Image (cartoon, coloured by chain):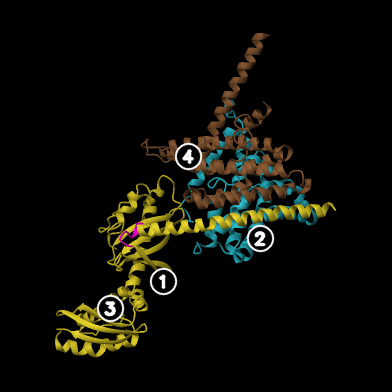
Chain colours: A brown, B yellow, C cyan
Amino acid sequence: MNRLKTLTNGLIRENPVLVLMIGLCPLLAVSNNAINALGMGIAATFVLICSNVVISLIRGVIPDQIRIPVFIVVISTFVTIIDLMMASYLPPLHKSLGIFVPLIVVNCIILGRGEAFAYRNRVFDALLDGIGMGVGFTLVIVLIGIIREVSGNGTIFGSARFIAHPAMIMILPPGAFITIGSLMGILNWTRNRQSEKDMIKKEEKE
Amino acid sequence: MEIIKKIVVLTIVTSVAAVLLAVTYKNTKPRIDAHMKNELERLRRDVLPRSSGFEEIKIRKEACYIGYDDEGRKAGLILPVSVKGYSGEIKMLIGMSMKGKIEGLYIINQTETPGLGNKIAAAEFTDQFRGLTEKEACLASDGSDGKIDAVTAATISSRAVTGGVKKGFNLYNEYVNYTGKRDILNRVPDGSYWGRGEGAAGPVRVEVVIESRGIKAIKVIRQQEAKRYWAKVKAEIPAKILREQTTEVDTVSGATLTSQGLIDAVQNALESAGRKGK
Amino acid sequence: MNEISLFGIFLSAMIVNNIVLIRFIGLCPFFGVSGRMESAIGMGMAVIFVMTVSSAVTWVIYNYLLVPMGLEFLKIVTFILVIASLVQLEELFMKKYIPNLYKSLGIYLPLITTNCAILAASFLHVDYSFSFIQALVYAIGVSLGFIVVIILFAGIRERLDTAPVPKALAGYPIAFFTAALMSLAFLGFKGLFGL
């Protein structure tokens, strides 16, 4: 039961992007189409899972004061690996993600989860946390990617154009801010409504 | 003691990381290189469809390629060009036939506005260039000969591309006028070769003897030029070619067509020799 | 890229390709510390200092250490470690020799390690294969661009605090919409210098 919670925590309740507000740069920068977004999501998830597991494995032998440099080395190693792998197996994607692949290093989600979770928990839990947070990140970035691609370019996952005159602003930088602002607004709105309902129920009971 | 432990741990972690990376790098590098090579090959074939083999040459210090068709004849040139676009550099590859017509155009890299300027990279725009000459490869709005329709609402980006194509033609002209003629000697094996050119009154046939990458002798086999022109041409042109070791020589004034006929005949001999050399 | 003037590099880094609003780099501190004007200025100052120094150092390391040894693939690991330790060194240096500056900027320095703008500036000068001077000018331009937008943004957000915003949009959502409008304004500079 507890483990299930560890796994699902990152999906919604503690979603790294929408709730914790970290990892914004790649989220906005590479989400102008769904394919890029999916690629970035998978790359970040891979790094997150691997670094979580490794950090949890070696946490016993690392002196406390040098843990951050060690985390950084671990994370940047995995980032380089995914960077090289992507360049050799998926070169077009590698090209369109560009500088944002190496910048996964400073994606606060990864260092943050290492420090806050993996460094204090057992390997299996760290793995689950990595999967949960990674999938949470991927879901949001792909969602934003789909919204922006459909509304801004009239296509989905690079398909044929089905909207004749899309709103181009959505694939330009402002569109990214608009999309995530709206998503958060909707999230807040449903939450507010939920808590209002709860309040009303409470009052009725009293 | 504490500090030593820290140093040891940090050293071990970084060494492990370095080894891991070196291994990954070693394993992925051939693939990345191969991929880049394939990609380049594919692009070259894309812009110069009739060619199957390529040879690198330098034109104005740019690394260009000569494409050869299946029979070893020159199919055209591949010219890399980069120009300033609306919001950044535009890099493109131009395939040019030896007759100076565009065979294909491919935008390798651009950072134009998504949805507007970046349409210059789409086939709808680049395919327009196919088969055009230097005069025709301009925007229709920029000149009466222009045959290119600019991308709607992205005239600056479109004009940047035609500007790049213009640069490509400059490289082509440079090659035709200079590099091409000189370059050919390097590929000709020793021997004697026949060639023909078109003079003022009919064909001029010559035999050219090549020895260790140099033109050793020029024998005229047949010509039917007017005598008064031919005498002057015969006295000056072969001597000049032998001295300067190139067909890039001035014609005799007052006998331009006859001179050109002889020069072309020698050039033609070199070209056919160069083909055999391949 | 080498034919572009230093001034062009500077303006394009600062405004046309603004690192925050156009390139989407350094967003976390942009939203994180822009709530109050004072902290926005502090963060901005710390960024210009660290970014210039670290761009210079990473340039030297990349061109005189990694490239000659054929170790370009280690650049991610090297750059982040160099930047992290540089930040520490700069903190110690400031504490000792410029205590006044340290007092005002000190708390922002540790945050900078995870500011992707610093790392991005280093990767970008490698990508563009800038010369040393160009890389320095670029770093200064990028960091000034960061300061300009973070100060503008902080000014707007301070006023937003007292504005009647729909409940669901209060806080971050309205901040994102504000950023969208600013980004739209900066898009207007596109095509100005052609970098």
Whichever of callouts 3 and 1 sits on the residue coming sooner in the sequence is 1
Q: Quadrant of the C terminus of chain B?
A: bottom left
Asked whether the residues under the numbered discs 3 and 4 touch, taking CB atoms below 8 Å apart as contact, a structural biologist would say no
**Where does the magenta region start and end?**
B46-51
What chain does mark 1 sit on?
A: B
Asked whether the residues under the numbered discs 1 and 2 touch, taking CB atoms below 8 Å apart as contact, a structural biologist would say no
Identify the amino acid type marked 2. Val
* Residue C14 seen in the figure: no
Report crowding for label 3: few under 14, some 14 to 19, many 20 or more residues within 10 A (C-alpha).
Answer: many
For residue C151, above or below residue B240: above
Residue at which label 4 appears: A34
The label number, if any, that marks residue C57 in the structure image: 2
The residue at 53%/32% (across/down) is A182
Q: Are both tags, 4 and 2, on one chain?
A: no
Residue at which label 1 appears: B60
Q: Is residue C193 left or right of residue A15?
A: left
In three-dimensional space, the C-alpha distance between marks 1 and 2, rounded to whole angstroms, equals 35 Å
